[in-house]
Image (cartoon, rainbow, N blue to C red):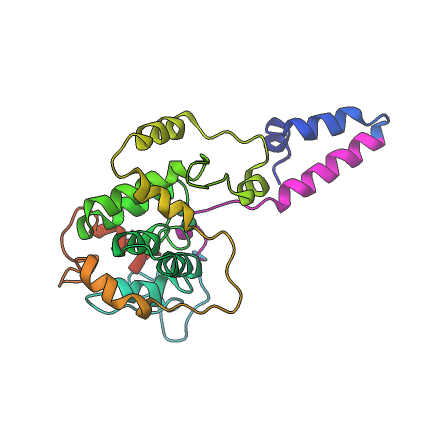
Amino acid sequence: MDRRSFLTNMSAATVVSIAGAVTLSEKADALEEAMSIELDKRIALPSFCTIDPTPEAVAGDTRPYYQHEDPRIPEMPAAPTLADFYKLRFAPANHVLQSARLATVNGMNEKIILACLLHDICVSNFIRTDHGYWCAQMVKPYVDEEVSWAIEAHQALRFFPDTEVGYEYPDAYIRFFGADYKPEPYLVEAHAKAKKHRWYMTSRLITMNDLYSFEEGVVVEIDDFTDIIGRNFRQPKEGLGFDGSPVAHMWRSMIWPNNFL
Ligand SMILES: [Fe+2]
Ligand SMILES: [Fe+2]
């Protein structure tokens, strides 16, 4: 760890624990402990950054970079469907599959079930930060406007309880971000705007079917939703990534996440 950047970015709790140590050696111990805690912190990186950039050589493959075909990930069909992405790129996709199942069990309509199925698809294999906005943009050309609007708004709504409908602030967020975490002003604003929108409940229902822990022993497959996808997702005949839409590059980036350029 870079000592200088650690010292500049120490949390208030770390400063207090080091300042509270009486002797020099106690201070050194406190510093050491704080550094090891910092090392354990999980850093969320886009998945592009987590694929090893210098893979082991594959026998007979003399390419210096794995442009397009990367032997470490499954090859996708020439015209990939949404289901192909679930099977070959998003898998196991437990969170979104289980959320869509819960929405089905709760008797939600097909738009809500589809929204739950799509609401976090970019998180595990594309990008985590501002994921509601990214996911909404990725699917916008292919779904009803209400669905992409609701996916975008869920980014903000997750952080705001709505006692009228029984939505509470997720316990998981207290564990993830600390009890004193406050959403940034742009999220406060997005929530206030969404609250007044005619599709507010569509997005709120995504958050209410958003599972933060998986149900043990429940196996959900993307094929369970073939009919709902067929009726509600406009699958381009050229395949996702190759239809010339304004978001095609996002799907291609998931097909070839490790292209050099
Ligand atoms: Fe989400
Ligand atoms: Fe989610």
Q: Residue at x 42, y 47 (%)?
A: 208
Q: Which residues are magenta?
A: 25-51
Q: Residue at x 77, y 34 (%)?
A: 30
* Residue 81 showing in the rendered view: no
Asked if 48 appears above or below 216 in the picture, the reply is: above
Q: Residue at x 33, y 31 (%)?
A: 195
- Residue 199: x percent and y percent? 26, 39
Asked if 104 appears above or below 162 in the picture, the reply is: below
Quarter of the figure that contains the N terminus:
top right
Seen from the viewer's position, the closer of residues 58 and 5 is: 5
- Residue 204: x percent and y percent? 36, 42
Q: Residue furthest front?
A: 164
Does the magenta stretch mainly form a helix, a strand or a loop? Answer: helix
- Residue 231: x percent and y percent? 18, 61
Q: Residue at x 55, y 45 (%)?
A: 172
- Residue 24: x percent and y percent? 83, 28
Seen from the viewer's position, the closer of residues 155 and 244 is: 155
Residue 125 lies within the magenta run: no
Asked where in the image residue 233 lies, by quadrant, the reply is bottom left
* Residue 192 showing in the rendered view: yes
> Relative to residue 238, is residue 206 drawn left or right?
right
Asked if 246 appears above or below 184 in the picture, the reply is: below
Q: Residue furthest right?
A: 23
Asked where in the image residue 190 lies, by quadrant, the reply is top left
Residue 42 lies within the magenta run: yes
> Relative to residue 249, is residue 172 drawn left or right?
right
Q: Disc count in the image?
A: 0
